[in-house]
Amino acid sequence: MSKPKRVVITGLGALSPLGNNVEDFWENLCNGVSGADRITNFDPSEFRTHFACELNDFDISEHLEHNTIRRSDPYSQYALVATDEAVEDSGLDFEEMDPFDTGVIWGSGQGGMHTFENEVKNYAENDYKPRFNPFFVPKLIINMAPGMISMKYGLMGINYATVSACATSNTAIMDAMNYIRWGKAKVMITGGSEAGITESSFGGFSAMRAMSQRNDDPKHASRPFDKDRDGFVMGEGAATLILEEYEHAKARGAKIYGEVTGAAMTADAYHMTATHPEGRGAKMAMKQALEDSELNAEDVDYLNTHATSTPVGDISETKAIASVFENNLDNLHINATKSMTGHLLGAAGAIEAIASIKTINEGIIPPTINTENVDEEIADGIQIVLNDAIEKEVDVAMSNTFGFGGHNGIVVFKKV
């Protein structure tokens, strides 16, 4: 069997609560800026939580044509905007390539929540039933984002969507990596998008008491690892990575950000919403991702944790990390970028992949903010980057994601 092809990253695009492009996102991340504030999308006063990490100063009409906006849900629109930046960043000219050589694998945990909510409300309030918009289904379904990306650029290769809750975009990245490894594609566009700050989605999480209720102080609400953490802060946005076969990228003189060396997924088989208390599935996924990368635990310099600021999840993750990296804790630094971005749900893995890749390129590990008193149950020896960014040469970075249903998705990146 031939050796798997190497996979590198040649383009990045971001649309986030910390900035509407990669440059602004990274600058605010390194400066410890919180994206949390009172919700403006709707009146949240009837819910337990009143705040989230929304996009700021973003006008979709500046990016897409009117007909595209009218026929698509915000989660697909966000995907198109982030992908535009990534494609431009990559320098790829798809008109010069065989259209079957490039595919799109995209992730979203919820898909067209705005469309679903608006259409059902309109139906319930309409005296002349049935009256649904003919674009209801196309706007709603999760695979429409990769479909629209392929249509925009004329890409005829592998094309589908992944769904594994908050592990979704790491699943997409893993699949995209593997198709290039196997020689089934030369280029893959991958990532994730989420537009879930709607009354129905937000209300559901609020009813579960999964989100922080620090309504008097949103900026300090997301506090991973802190003993007073009380839940996650919802975020929205999108992130795109252009993955490319190494020899193909080198031949065209592409800028290479780093290599995707491996990935893995496991299931906790434990609970619908809670992680395994000892991080059993997470531990195995991290080990398998290292094995897939042909790396040892001692090779990893930095780990972007899933750490959502929930009471159980943060502890179980650090237990898993301490077990896997028990002989490397003196070298390993971890952080929780959700303390600033909030939790982008199905897009979390993609935006955190960009944070990991930028860390490798810039030699800067962004901070974990708001953590004032580290929980005593956090595993001993864990080095959390707190309050201020640090400078560190990072050759290998790992990014963790875990989702409702017990899904664990891990991706490993390496300097080229």
Image (spheres, rainbow, N blue to C red):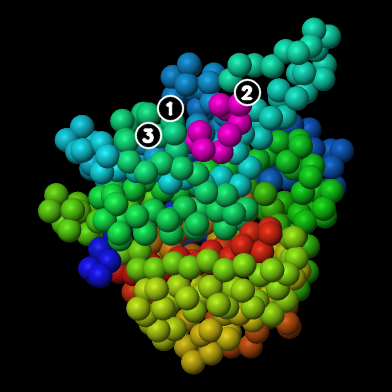
Task: Give the extent of the magenta segment.
Answer: 137-145
* Residue that label 3 marks: 150
Q: Nearer the viewer, residue 25 or 396?
A: 396
The residue carrying pointer 3 sits among few (fewer than 14), some (14 to 19) or many (20 or more) residues within 10 Å by Cα, namely many
Question: What separation in Å lies between label 2 and label 3 (alpha carbons)?
Answer: 20 Å
**Which quarter of the figure has residue 271?**
bottom right
Q: Is residue 141 inside the magenta stretch?
A: yes
The residue carrying pointer 2 sits among few (fewer than 14), some (14 to 19) or many (20 or more) residues within 10 Å by Cα, namely some
Q: Nearer the viewer, residue 50 or 75?
A: 75
Residue drawn at (22%, 59%) of the image: 246
* Residue that label 1 marks: 63
Q: Are marks 1 and 3 in contact (CB under 8 Å)?
A: no
User: Sequence-wise, which precedes: disc 1 or disc 3?
Assistant: 1
Q: Amino acid at mark 1?
A: His
Evaluate whether residue 304 shows in this view: yes
Could you say where residue 19 lies in the image, as x and y percent from the top left?
49, 44
Could you say where residue 147 lies in the image, as x and y percent from the top left?
44, 34
Q: Amino acid at mark 2?
A: Phe
For discs 1 and 2, the disc positioned in front in the rendered view: 2
Evaluate whether residue 16 shows in this view: no
Residue drawn at (42%, 56%) of the image: 175
Residue drawn at (84%, 48%) of the image: 207
* Residue that label 2 marks: 136
Label 2: element kind: helix
For discs 1 and 3, the disc positioned in front in the rendered view: 3
User: Sequence-wise, which precedes: disc 2 or disc 3?
Assistant: 2
